[in-house]
Amino acid sequence: MAKPVRGLRFQPSGGSRAAQIPVGKKQRLTIERLANDGRGIAFLEGRTWFVVGALAGEEVEARVLGAHGKVVEARTERVFSASDLRRPAPCAHAGRCGGCSVQHLPHDEQLALKQRMLAEQLSRVAGVEPEEWAAPLSGPEFGYRRRARVAVRWDAKAKKLEVGFRAAGSQDIVAIDECPVLVQPLQPIMSRLPAMLQRLSKPQALGHVELFSGSAIAVLLRHMAPLSAADLEILQAFCAFHEAQLWLHGEGEPQPVDPDQALGYRLEPWNLQLAYRPGDFVQVNAGVNEAMVAQALEWLAPQADERVLDLFCGLGNFALPLAQKVREVVAVEGVATMVARAAENAASNNLHNTRFFQADLSQPLSDAEWAGEGFSAVLLDPPRDGAFEVVRKLASLGAKRLVYVSCNPATLARDTVELVRQGYRLKRAGILDMFPQTAHVEAMALFEAS
């Protein structure tokens, strides 16, 4: 008689599947290290936990936000054993609002974290280190954000209008009465906004609100149904009290209630005024933006007789200061309305040595009319996806110097591989602290042809 086979477990086709961890479950964890996005990493029973609000070496209680296979996303609920680096969260909404995920770290440690993230990406992906590390470009850690989008949603079940910012790890809205990272002119608007919106007659038809502080203060309301005369009167009175422009976004593009009002921002070191409309891309940190433009000009070292290319030019944030220093600037942007606005900004600032073109810069640059004569230097400031198709052709444009402004170290590192392959050297790199209290990393890199 054959011996029974012991220790074998029969499994259904595809193998066994571990039970998922339910959302909301609390778990005690020991944090091993920090991830590149500033979350704490813990390991438990074969799973990797990413915990918002935790620091290396801490013992915490974490609440599950979501689980996918062997990965669990969670947020810190309690800290049993705190890191020496931990500071009290400066914001009363910390841990609930999803906006400022590393505010429990001192600012100098936030900068060090971002520096490590950039260095790790360049080393691991591109296998390079810059010949020189630049000091971080930074400004005040609070009161810096000149633009904010406020979430607005009607809860039909509770018959309540929710106004605030998105919660960490969910679509819930956290009511916000004060936001320490907003510039001071927007603070009183933020605190009084919920009560004003609750007075409107059709709260279920309201979308988001956008706040902006530049050469003027503006409040934009997105609405999905026409506003009544009474509602418009409430909105106008609110904006008049706060000395703010009122913009409405129903069908079509956002429009100011008073068409004679101008909105924009200044680049003071260059005596430039740039027009802006809600929905346009603009850097939210005015001080770091000016420092970034100044550093880009210093690194690119444009000469008076040169022709320079500015890719992903937006409203002309780099192109217009460049135009004051060189023979010609050719600026390219993917969004047609932004191209038109940038051209208008150049004309209004009496800069006539700039040419603006619309092109899809995520596609190969083939037979582009603006690329024909070549360039001495190139500046590019792409979105998070990077600029892979663009950098593949940069050497063919004849550029000896290239400044790459990045909002994603991973795609900067990927594109660095291609630039090195084309014969460029990474001369200098450093972080731009555009978003203090967050793990978001912006960076600048200087490449020179070998």
Image (spheres, rainbow, N blue to C red):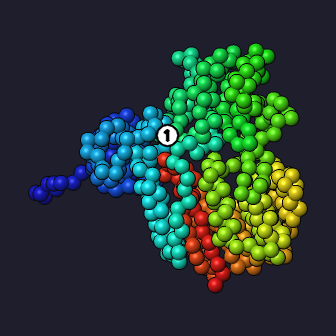
Q: Which residue has dot 1 on it?
A: 98
User: What amino acid type should be assigned to the residue bearing mark 1?
Assistant: Gly
Residue 49 percent coordinates (x, y): 36, 49
Q: Residue at x 44, y 55 (%)?
A: 108
Looking at the figure, which quarter contains the C terminus? bottom right
What residue is drawn where x is 74% and y is 72%?
A: 302
- In this view, the residue in front, 10 or 389, is 389
Looking at the image, is 99 positioned above or below residue 442?
above
Q: Whole-percent x and y of residue 358?
A: 81, 58
For the N terminus, the quadrant is: bottom left
Query: Where residue 422 sits: x, y (%)?
Result: 65, 80
Of residues 279 and 266, the one drawn nearer to the viewer in this rendering: 266
Residue 371 placement: quadrant: bottom right
- Left or right of 223 on screen, residue 179: left
**441 vs 413: above or below:** above
Residue at (77%, 41%) from the top-left corner? 263
Q: Which residue occupies the foreground of this view, 2 or 216?
A: 216
Is residue 247 toward the left or the right of residue 49 in the image?
right
Can residue 34 be seen in this snapshot?
A: yes
Q: What residue is at 49 percent from the left and 47 percent from the top? A: 437
Q: Secondary structure at mark 1?
A: loop
Residue 121 percent coordinates (x, y): 49, 66
